[in-house]
Image (cartoon, rainbow, N blue to C red):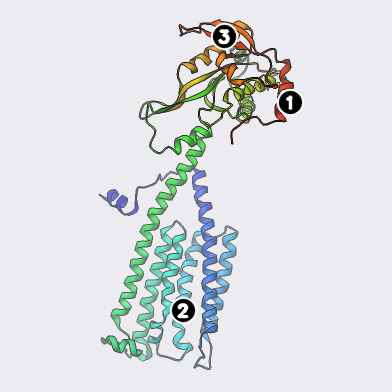
Amino acid sequence: MKSTLSAFLFGKNANSHLPERVHNAIEKQQYESEKLIGWVQLLLVTIFATLYIISPNKPMSDGIQPVPWALGLYYLFTLKRLALAYRNKLSTWFLTASVIADIGLLMVLIWSFHIQYMQPASFYLKAPTVLYVFIFIALRSLRFDPRYILIAGGTAAAGWVILTGYVIWSEGGKSMITRDYVTYLTSNSILIGAEVDKIIAIVLVTAVLAIAVMRAKRSFIRAVTDEIAARDLSRFVSPEIANRITHAEQQIRPGDGDAVNATVMFTDIEGFSSISEKLSPKELATMLNEYFTETSALISRFGGVITQFEGDAMLITFNAVTPDTDHALNAVRTALAIQDLSERRIYSHGSPLKTRCGINSGEIVIGAIGSESRLTFTVHGDNVNIASRLESLNKEFGTYILATEDTMRACGNHDDIPKWEERGDVTVRGREKSTKIFSLPPLKSAPRVLQQKSDSPITSRD
């Protein structure tokens, strides 16, 4: 029952065990809020001072002038608080004292009016300055912490009770209480009901704001947690796929997908098993991180999207997630760039990493597969399978780039692409229909190709 009421009033509870980085992100936002609060307070005290200066307020008292003193003290206090906010040195106890001081100084300012103008104490109960109490309470809602709203509201309610009590028992206990509303408005009499209304208004406004901020705080914590989680998870899938998932009009369900004409490339490191058995797990991880970091940069450079990692292999798509009218050409250019990298880069284990590539173009389906509780966003279809088989066929032909006729024709004739070599018709595993395949010549020409490419546009994508 208690948890149900809490959820009804304050919204769904956030995780009470927040990771340190989530806590730090929230604290950073709180610090920024305190800076804003400080500037608003400085604006308010400036408004107070301006109104005091320009208003016809010639005092009737020849003694001390309390209003300027109260404004001056509050101005200095606000400057000190703002300076501490920028230095992130506003501790909990100081913030609590600050909130009490805000309301306290405002109450002192209101109280001082009857001394300033030599009027009965009830004079200050009609001062419009009391409206600023609600501004100071609302100001605390800029920080996602209802405690300070409650402190401000509680201090304001208690302060007004004290001010009202002071009026009732001032001047030797002489009462100025009236039940006549007209008399209350036209004299210095006090109407208890009017002051009770003010206190009730302060309490209710405080309660409403505290509930609203508590609801907002829980939503804020969930939002920050989700944002950090999404940012972390986006490192495990390509940003393009993450963007597609998060911006889908409706929640993606198993089987949802779109048919697109695209180019698919599979890559695999030659002799990876032999390399792996010679390295410790840590050394292997270091080597793969180096390899994937550099190849990923090349793939992104030519507009490709890594749709899936599997061990040392990659599934890369062009025009499946992001538009690319030259998807076949850019896939081939990516393969050539990877070959050039394989020739010149020595990795942490002391040797280069030769990479085999299989490329195919045609209609594929990109979408979600799996169950309601666990989905994978990937590409599938016959043309995807062909690209996978071509990568493996590189072993038989002694090549590093094999592509289908569809990819070769889609590329067209370009000076930065070496002449294709026909490898005949092959029936790839799992298919009955034969496929005509082509390879690119030895990689000694690749450096020239990449040099030309670096001086010209590499993709038609915006």
Mark 1: few/some/many CA within 10 Å (<14, 14-19, 20+): few
Residue 346: numbered disc? none
Q: Nearer the viewer, mark 2 or mark 3?
A: 3
Q: Is residue 299 above or below residue 339?
A: below
Q: Which residue is mark 1?
A: 451
Q: Secondary structure at mark 3?
A: helix
Q: Quadrant of the C terminus?
A: top right
Point out residue 109 in the picture as x, y percentages from the top left corner: 47, 79
Q: Is residue 210 above or below residue 295?
A: below
Q: Amino acid at mark 3?
A: Leu
Task: For residue 305, say whether it is visible.
Answer: yes
Q: Which residue is mark 3?
A: 393
Q: Is residue 193 left or right of residue 308?
A: left
Q: Amino acid at mark 1?
A: Gln
**Picture quadrant of residue 396:** top right
Q: Is residue 124 left or right of residue 301?
A: left
Residue in the picture at 25% in, 49% down: 1
Q: Is residue 20 above or below residue 89?
A: above
Between the C-alphas of marks 2 and 1, the distance is 77 Å
Residue 108: numbered disc? 2
Point out residue 118 in the picture as x, y percentages from the top left corner: 45, 91
Numbered-mark total: 3
Q: Nearer the viewer, mark 3 or mark 1?
A: 1
Q: Secondary structure at mark 1?
A: helix
Residue in the picture at 44% in, 73% down: 132
Point out residue 409 in the picture as x, y percentages from the top left corner: 59, 17
Q: Amino acid at mark 2?
A: Val
Mark 2: few/some/many CA within 10 Å (<14, 14-19, 20+): some
Label pair 2/3, CB-CB below 8 angstroms: no
Between the C-alphas of marks 3 and 1, the distance is 29 Å
Between the C-alphas of marks 2 and 3, the distance is 87 Å
Label pair 3/1, CB-CB below 8 angstroms: no
